[in-house]
Image (spheres, rainbow, N blue to C red):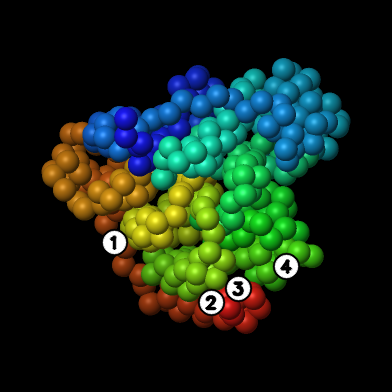
Amino acid sequence: MSVPDQVLVYAPETEVLRYPPDCPFKTERATATRRQLLQAGLLGSGPLQEVRPQPATRAELERLHAPRYLDLLQAAAAGELTAESLHVGLGGPDTPVFPHMWEYARWACGAALTAADLLLQGQARIAFNLHGGFHHAHAARAGGFCYLNDVALACERLVAAGRRVMYLDLDAHHGDGVQAFFYDRNDVLTVSLHESGKTLYPGTGFEDELGEGPGYGYNVNVPLPAGTYDAAFLKAYFTIVAPLLRAYRPDVLVVELGMDILAGDPLTHLLMTNNVVVEVARHLRQTGLPLLVSGGGGYQFEPTVRGWALAWRTLAGQDCEDAWSLGLGGTMMSTLDWAGGWRDPERPVPADLCAQVEPELNRTLQRLQQTVPLLQRA
């Protein structure tokens, strides 16, 4: 039996586990993306397969999370909210307490660990976990819709197996939780491209946050100005990420692929189209490295689904616009908001926006090239 090239790690059990109805975070995005892939013939045949995970165990969660915090999280899901619970971030505006919070977080982490194991065992070259991407969770604190940090746990699993890991966070929000876990370590290079903390939660992720001790120089942040558009984002990506890959030479890439970078997202201020997702996915595929791709932010439901479907298709090497994408846009893709297929139309960039974004971005890139040792080595 041949080994699948690309695997979607998907837990049907999560389909009944949801955040409160008024919360912007929708767990249903993963289910809708899977449905689109099935309808397009991009899942369940040949090298494109699906694997069911198990929820993470308590012992697995304790690899990074504090036992007392896990106790409080589980108790809060059962309706026991105390002053101590509030102190660790539970019950805030962006960390609602609801019955499914513990179980969904465990499934997301279990899916991430399953994805890591598939790569370690050579059972996939690319593994997707669209249940995950909870990069704001800290060892003993919740934040930003995140309770348990699946991507950090996956990085830890890969490192424990002797792999050299590069974590690439492309969510609009800075991955502060992942940064905190590995800030003093050099066995995980953390790289985050995100909207600047000057204008967006969590208010961190500036270019002078470079790590400490053995981890100095192994934490790289690229804060993007509000209004960043496709060409500016891709300039930042190829100026910073490509040289870091050459210098660090990771064994595996863990990628958080948030779709809140897309224009129109209600929680962010970036202006990208999903064409940048295609360009990034092409580059990641060309590295030839094993990839663990995670979900993340994305608070426009249908654009998020289209973006993830595009990433899957592009990484599978099927990124040409063909009949089923364009010609059937109004039929097969009838649940989507853009009848022209999965790709967004290009957005013109006004001159005043260029004049607003480019100088700030250029200053950031120059500072990083001057201060990040790995970039000077590339």
Element at label 2: loop
Q: In the rendered structure, which disc, 1 or 3, sits on the residue that comes first in sequence?
A: 1
Q: In this figure, which residue is indicated by the disc labeled 3? A: 374
Question: Please, what is the three-letter code of the amino acid marked with disc 1?
Answer: Glu
| Badge number at residue 367 | none
Foreground tag (4 vs 1): 4
Q: In this figure, which residue is indicated by the disc labeled 1? A: 346
Residue depicted at 62% across the width and 82% down the height? 370
**Mark 2–mark 3 distance (CA, rounded to whole Å):** 6 Å
Tag 2 and tag 3, C-beta contact below 8 Å:
yes
Classify residue 119 as left or right of residue 33.
right
**Mark 3–mark 4 distance (CA, rounded to whole Å):** 10 Å
Quarter where residue 208 is shown: bottom right
Tag 4 and tag 1, C-beta contact below 8 Å:
no
Element at label 3: helix
Q: In this figure, which residue is indicated by the disc labeled 4? A: 216
Is 49 in front, or is 310? 49
Q: Is residue 29 above or below residue 207?
A: above
Question: Please, what is the three-letter code of the amino acid marked with disc 4?
Answer: Tyr
